Amino acid sequence: MATKRDMIVRPAHDLGGLPAGPVVPSDHEMTPFEKSCHALLNVLAAHKLVNTEEKRRGVEDLGAEIIGDLTYYERWAVSASKVLIEKGVITSEELGARMNEIRDRLTEAAA
Amino acid sequence: MTNPRETGVVGHGDHTHGAPGAPDPHAPIETAAGEPDYFDVLHQAIRELLVDKGLITADEVRAMVETLDAHRPTLGSALVARAWTDPDFKERLLADGTAAIEEFGIDNYDGTRLIVLEQTPEVHNLVVCTLCSCYPRPVLGLPPDWYKSRPYRARAVRAPRALLREFGTEVAQDVTIRVHDSNANMRYLILPMRPAGTEGMSEEELAALVTRDTMIGVTTPRLP
């Protein structure tokens, strides 16, 4: 368990030099969601809407517990939404409304 | 690190499987209840809002998916084979990686600076991103899961020789290991040493020896 000091001087992403087990030579084919999410974030970076540092900071701000529970691209999607809201590019109200629309659309299509 | 034999939990680096009651991160997007996946909906909503605002286009996102598909480690392999057979190109590649890959016809689509580092009999270079997952995507495609995993990121800068041994790479004690920590704007590609006994090989045959892992620095090229 990390001490309070560790939590401040060693944020969750800062792993260099820490003890850890053996490397598992793992890999997987990207899912359509992962690929689409990656492409979206690249386009956001190209338009200077969310750059790489902002994206990473958005992930770090989720905190160790959420970072540990979410998958890599789930973290990216949440980070992008938070950074865009902070910068005033979108509002949380319009994001929530659009998510409801999309959810209804997908549920209808599946029915 | 949790032992999967004891708990059934399998670590995939950035996420785990098999904890009691835990959802499978690789499960299809539609959940059992038919409820669309939260994060899938979230990223679609971001895209649609920004398209509606005229800040991005849907075509750009589609084209980027194709770009991601097109950029694979074979680009890096061809680059290394060219450097092995063309000393002038190798010199340019080591002097300015970004300019040299563009000259070679590789689209440096993420706009990052590429630094190419040469393996020598005296120095073995290894690439990591301790903070996250920075990687030379234009030349190698997307990083494997282990590159983004906690053990790799944590140990590459502390115990590289032991880490390399796990990849089957034995680096002699008198060879210096230099570890390069990538960042958002600066990415590294390793130029491996051309193996002895490849003098008569064509550029294509040479490229086949250059695997992704040799260009990260965790392995060295081997003759088949």
Image (spheres, rainbow, N blue to C red):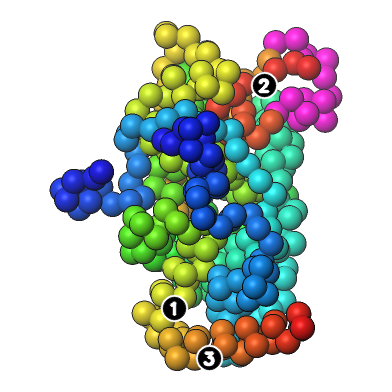
Disc 3 is placed on an element classified as helix
Provide the chain ID for the residue under circle 3: A
Amino acid type shown at disc 1:
Leu
Callout 2 environment at 10 Å: few (<14), some (14 to 19), or many (20+)?
A: some
Q: Would residue A57 be visible to someone looking at this image?
A: no
Query: In terms of secondary structure, where does tag 2 sit?
Result: loop
- The region drawn magenta spans B196-210
Q: Are marks 2 and 1 in contact (CB under 8 Å)?
A: no
Q: Is residue B203 magenta?
A: yes
Name the mark nearer the viewer: 1 or 3. 3
At x 73% / y 87%, what residue is drawn? Answer: A108
Q: Is residue B82 above or below residue B134?
A: above
Return the x and y of residue B179 as percentages of the image width and height. 42, 30
Q: In percent of the image, x 36 and y 57: which residue is there?
A: A65
Mark 2 residue type:
Pro
Task: Using the rendered image of the protein, determine whether residue A95 is visible from the camera's viewpoint.
Answer: yes
> What's the CA distance linking mark 1 and mark 3?
16 Å
Residue B77 placement (x, y as % from top left): 71, 35
* Chain at tag 2: B
Residue position for label 1? A84
* Residue at screen point 43% across, 40% down: B150
Pointer 3 and pointer 2 on the same chain: no
Residue that label 3 marks: A97
Label 1 crowd (10 A; few <14 / some 14-19 / many >=20):
many
Comparing A35 with B25, the one in front is: B25
Please tell me whether mark 1 sits on a helix, a strand or a loop. Answer: helix
Q: Are marks 1 and 3 in contact (CB under 8 Å)?
A: no
- B40 in the magenta segment: no
Neighbours of disc 3 within 10 Å: few (<14), some (14-19), many (20+): few
Q: To which residue does mark 2 refer? A: B221
Q: Nearer the viewer, residue B59 or A60?
A: A60
Amino acid type at image mark 3 = Ala
